[in-house]
Amino acid sequence: MKSYRDAPSGTVGRARRLRRDATDAEKLLWRQLRECLPAAKFRRQSPVGPYIADFLSFGPRLIVEIDGGQHATQAAGDERRTRYLEGQGYRVVRFWNSEVLSNCDGVLQTSASQIGSERTG
């Protein structure tokens, strides 16, 4: 089991709150990831350094992020976050909330292809 002993203060509590207060898109994608990609063993709202990844799979080192409207105005912060996560060895894929709600199958296919590319790459 992953230990969060070295996570910055407050990160684990914030992750718990985010899990409890999940958006509709997060709830939908969580159900679908667990049902359609069970071997990837995703965790939701998982701390990675000072950040919290929406959905993280340790095996293929994949992070799936779901962005709401507030992310349109914080592109620089998202880019910094993505660089940090990639520096930790993760691949990061991002989707908009609306994309998850309207095209969940496409989001799952893209996520599955990222997992598959790790196995073949």
Image (cartoon, rainbow, N blue to C red):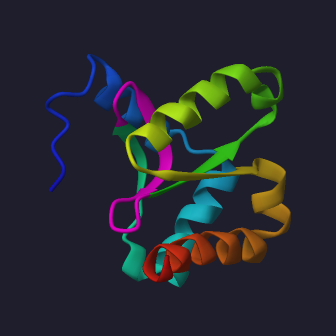
Which x, y percent locates residue 107?
Answer: 71, 68
Q: Nearer the viewer, residue 26 or 105?
A: 105
Please provide the residue range marked out in magenta. Answer: 48-61
Q: Is residue 77 left or right of residue 54?
A: right
Left or right, 42 with respect to 9, comes to: right
User: Is 7 left or right of 88, judged from the image as shown?
Assistant: left
- Residue 68 lies, with reference to residue 119, above or below; the image says above
Is residue 13 or residue 36 the one in the foreground?
36
**Image coordinates for residue 50, horizontal then vertical, percent:** 38, 24
Residue 120 drawn at (x, y percent): 48, 83
Asked if the magenta segment contains residue 3, the reply would be: no
Query: Where, by quadrant of the figure, is residue 6 drawn?
Result: top left
Residue situated in front as seen by the camera: 92 or 35: 92
Q: State which quarter of the image contains the N terminus.
A: bottom left
Q: Is residue 101 above or below residue 49?
A: below
Residue 105 falls in image quadrant: bottom right
The residue sitting at 44% across, 80% down in the picture is 119
Residue under the image location 44 percent in, 30 percent down: 51
Q: Residue at x 75, y 30 (%)?
A: 71
